[in-house]
Image (spheres, helix red, strand yellow):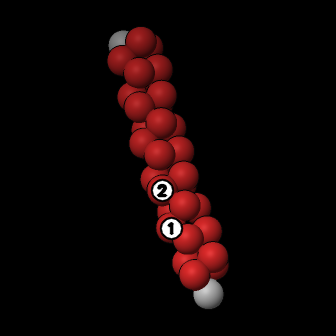
Amino acid sequence: MLAYADFASALTVYLMSLQFFACALVQESYTNLR
C-alpha cells in the first residue's frame, strides 16, 4: 500500500510539473506570435 501511495504522489508531481511546463511553453509561443 505504501508503494502504491508513493507511486501515486510521484505521478501527481510529474503531471503537475508537466502541466506547468506545457502552460509556460504555450504562453511563450503566444507572446512570440504577438
Q: Is residue 24 above or below residue 30?
A: below
Whole-percent x and y of residue 17? 47, 46
Asked whether 34 or 16 is in front, the reply is 16
Q: Is residue 17 above or below residue 15?
A: above
Whole-percent x and y of residue 14? 54, 52
The residue at the point 41 percent across, 31 percent down is 24
The residue at the point 54 percent across, 61 percent down is 10
> Would you say 16 lies left or right of 6 here?
left
Whole-percent x and y of residue 8? 57, 71
Asked whether 23 or 10 is in front, the reply is 10
The kind of residue tagged 1 is Ser
The residue at the point 41 percent across, 12 percent down is 32
Q: Is residue 3 above or below residue 14?
A: below
Residue 8 visible at all: no
Asked whether 5 or 32 is in front, the reply is 5
User: For residue 13, which numbered disc appears in the image?
Assistant: 2
Determine whether the residue tagged by mark 2 lies in a helix, strand or loop. helix
Residue count near mark 1 (Cα–Cα under 10 Å), binned few <14, some 14–19, many ≥20: few
In this figure, which residue is indicated by the disc labeled 1? 9
